[in-house]
Amino acid sequence: LECLHREYPNKLAHVLQGDRDAKPPRELTPVFFGCFDWHSAVHGHWLLARLCRLNPGAAYTAEARAALASSFTAARARREVEYLKGKGRAGFERPYGLAWLLQLHAELVEWDDPQARKWRRVLDPLAAESAARFKAWLPKLSHPARTGEHSQSAFALGLVLDWARTTNDSELEALVTRRALDYYGNDKGWSFSFEPGGQDFLSPGLAEADLMRRVMKPGVYTRWLTGFLPALPSDAAKTWLKPAVVTDRSDGKLAHLDGLNLSRAWMLEGMLRGLPAGDNRIPVLRKAALEHRKAGLAAVTGEHYEGGHWLGSFAVYLVTARGF
């Protein structure tokens, strides 16, 4: 609530075609202009929508609804779409921000509430534009982006797939499923000795594993995971995949590791849901998930805006078991 419409500081992912494009964030993208950057503004709105949906009687609900209503107007949304369609912006916030936009839209689709239905209709054109961009881009993406930051393809594809299934977009669901199998279906021997990167907030390996449990049948996924993580121990007493430690939470990039702990936790929990009861890897995965959950949630304090403008969304995604 504090940062949703806080315009500054602000980091723009903005391509200028001339002097006329030099405008403040509130004029460029009037729906999502706060929270330091566009994608954080998007998932900040998602956070409020999800909490209002799950906890309608909470003390913050009235204020949260008012904030969402202020953002989700037809006039603002039209200008937001115009911005996305502007010259030189075909790759704007792709894939991370666009995937979160679809997650926000999916939340409104699933929310049985008159006001939420109104907001969903307002965002329908933005969701349609985002989905169309993935449909155009994925056939051309020849290789996955195996990074630990915004460009990573695996995490974004999971959000996109969840939206496609929520909205019954069978074309996009089939495309994401096919491309996920193309990119990751034959992967073997992933090593966490090369993770994490010092500025990661997503695990390339775990994000891939969490995506594949969405697109593979349980038995197939079990076998795939054996090949993908051959070093995963079956003894829960062994130490595996320790939580990352942040050395300076006032540094926005270094603080990414707090988000990594949160995202690792939900990805590990997702992997658990893809395995059959009695699988001997479940204890060590559960132990790692709990350790990362504890470390990640302890860092969600709001003390520093560098992490405070976005970590809450990751915490809510984790504790509300979104994506399952």
Image: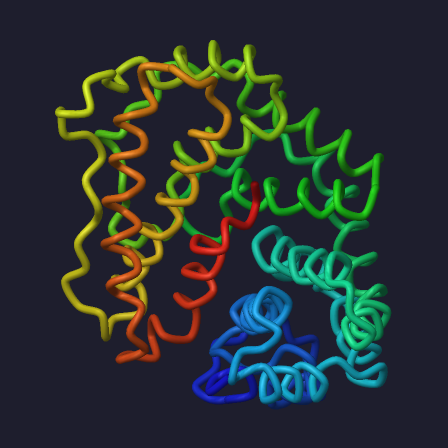
Pinpoint residue 91: horizontal percent, then vertical percent.
66, 56
Pinpoint residue 1: horizontal percent, then vertical percent.
51, 84
Regarding residue 292, the answer to whether it shows in the image is: yes
Q: Examine the rendered structure and indicate whether residue 148 appears above or below residue 272.
A: below
Q: How many marks?
A: 0
| Quarter residue 287 falls in | top left
Please give left or right for residue 231 compared with residue 162 in the image: left
Q: Examine the rendered structure and indicate whether residue 164 appears above or below residue 68.
A: above
Regarding residue 13, the answer to whether it shows in the image is: no
| Quarter residue 297 falls in | bottom left
Residue depicted at 43% across the width and 55% down the height = 319
Pinpoint residue 83: horizontal percent, then vertical percent.
75, 74
Q: Examine the rendered structure and indicate whether residue 193 appears above or below residue 307.
A: above
Q: Nearer the viewer, residue 302 or 203?
A: 302
Residue depicted at 60% across the width and 67% down the height = 46
Q: Nearer the viewer, residue 3 or 39?
A: 3
Q: Examine the rendered structure and indicate whether residue 224 appears above or below residue 247.
A: above
Q: How is the image coloured?
A: rainbow
Q: Nearer the viewer, residue 18 or 313?
A: 313
Pinpoint residue 63: horizontal percent, then vertical percent.
58, 89
Residue depicted at 52% across the width and 69% down the height = 40
- Looking at the figure, which quarter contains the C terminus? top right
Residue depicted at 44% across the width and 53% down the height = 318
